Amino acid sequence: MIRFENVTKRFPDGTEALKDISLVLPTHELTAIIGPSGCGKTTLMKMINKLEKPTGGTIYIDENPINGMDEVQLRRSIGYVIQRIGLFPHMTISDNVSLVPKLLEWPKDKKEARVRELLQLVGLDPETYMDRFPLELSGGQQQRVGVIRALAGDPNIVLMDEPFSALDPISREQLQDELRNLQQTINKTIVFVTHDMDEALKIADSIIVMRDGQVEQIGTPQQLVDDPANEFVRNFIGVERINQKRAFGEKRLFEFLDLFTAEWSGGAEKISADATIEKAFLQLDDSRHNYLAIVEGEQIIAYATDRDLLKAALFKEQGVSV
Amino acid sequence: MKSFLDTLVSRQDMIISAFLEHIYLSFVAVAIGIAIALPLGIIITRYRRYAEPIIGVTAVFQTIPSLALFGFLVPILGIGSPTALIALIIYALLPILRNTYAGIVGVDGSTIEAGRGMGMTRTQILRQIELPLALPFIMAGIRTATVLTVGIATLATFVGAGGLGDIIYRGLQSYNNSLVLAGALPVALLAIGFDQILKWIEKRATPKGLKT
Ligand SMILES: Nc1ncnc2c1ncn2[C@@H]1O[C@H](COP(=O)(O)OP(=O)(O)O)[C@@H](O)[C@H]1O
Ligand SMILES: [Mg+2]
């Protein structure tokens, strides 16, 4: 768990980038930080690995204040994906990915095995890509390498600063899906900065909405859409999206089977495919399970999480935007 | 043409020893120039406030006509190869210093921030990121310095430091065009030769991933 306690940041030129921020970033969750450009997202994130130091307040990782920690050691234990990829152009993909393991002085075999494992994890064939240089890869491939480079040292915490913002919409959607799937496997504490609400709603467990160095609202994607704290959050989410969710809440589950998960082996709450999305949300909220099993007759035809339901609720005729 | 070849043969010993002196002067001047300008160039990237004034000072030296600089140094340091070397070093400094500084400052800030964010120390960032990426610039600076030095070293003769300038000067004094040529041609070949070799090294020094 990362905890900010009354953190402020005033730059030497007088800019107040963060104003008395207190918040918690829960372990094993993907928290998105969102807000307009210049609201302090990057500054907030850089506080965690001490690339920026607070001018007031304290940051704790697992209740240990980071002020006293050695910054080089701390950074090696935290994955970092920078806003503009930042791969080292003169190093091979393999050298890029194994940078932190090298700093941590892992043995050679372990480093190489790690590089192979990670490349495979994001669908890049190790034999093909290990010895290539970053500029020989497409933007999407470079960004994947940027992400796995941050995971290489097996950190518990990963910081990502608008990692997908420079990509074309198709690669971006694809990488968002991949990150979501990846997170199911790796279960890291991820802090994900973005200015794209669609992206945040799609991948985050919880979302922190910022404005002007302050936190406007913290909540799950669903809470934000259902109950925006104020006018600013409402506008930022988009009135259109909120209304759409209301309207689509009346639609029935069987219309969206494509969006749901086909397989799930754990426990699930049964619900009829005829039920409305609104009802499904409520039933899942009350249930002790995280999954709904959608039944038609006696047969289970799909599974859905609250994220899947939100997807359905925000579904647009021309395609899935969330 | 025939008289030129005759001159080459008859003055062979003198030309070879002047040639070697010339290489020695240029080489030592560039080597010391690198030893001073490279670390200095790195240091001023860490204290950027001082970068402009320091590069400015070396640039002022550069604008002093070379013959005048030799002239200034003689009353202070006397006649001899140390005087010539010091003058040559002063000329070699600027290109190396300026290119080292520009090469390192020109490294993309996001690359360096990525290194910092992943827990590299300042020394690691310098050695593993900044220097490799700046190397092509630094090599280009060394190349410029070398060609410059080889040319200016012909003036070493005026402070009694020898070199191919001796031959040219002698030829001029005795109105012997062949002898002038026998001194000038090796200077040109030396400059071109060094330039080509350093160009090759410069190419090899360009990190693989940056070649397109
Ligand atoms: N090094 C700095 N010096 C002065 N002001 C800065 C510095 N870095 C960021 N800022 C300012 O702090 C505010 C927040 O910046 P940032 O955290 O980068 O915003 P975001 O990532 O949300 O776009 C902006 O007004 C920005 O101009
Ligand atoms: Mg930013």
Image (tube, coloured by chain):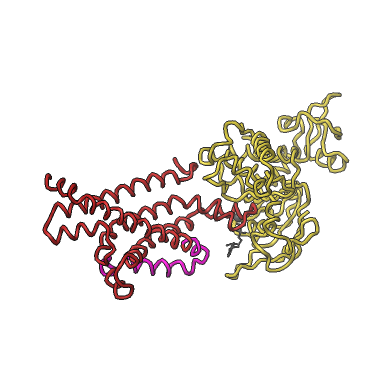
Chain colours: A yellow, B red
On the rendered structure, is B76 left or right of A143? left
Q: For residue B61: magenta? A: yes
In this view, the residue in front, A45 or A236, is A45
**Residue A140: image location, x then y, percent:** 57, 39
Residue A308 shows up from this direction: yes
**Residue B57: image location, x then y, percent:** 39, 69
In this view, the residue in front, A53 or A103, is A103
Residue A221 shows up from this direction: no
Residues rendered magenta in the picture: B41-69
Residue A302 in the image: above or below residue A41: above
Q: Residue furthest top?
A: A298
Q: Quadrant of the C terminus of chain B?
A: top left
On the rendered structure, is A153 left or right of B67? right
Q: Quadrant of the N terminus of chain B?
A: top left
**Residue A176: image location, x then y, percent:** 65, 40
**Residue B33: image location, x then y, percent:** 40, 61
On the rendered structure, is A112 left or right of B129? right
Residue drawn at 61 percent across, 47 percent down: A163
Residue drawn at 79 percent across, 32 percent down: A303
Residue A218 in the image: above or below residue A297: below
On the rendered structure, is A296 left or right of B140? right
In this view, the residue in front, B72 or A135, is B72
Q: For residue A181: magenta? A: no
Residue drawn at 65 percent across, 42 percent down: A148
Considering the whole magenta stretch, tell me its main secondary structure. Answer: helix
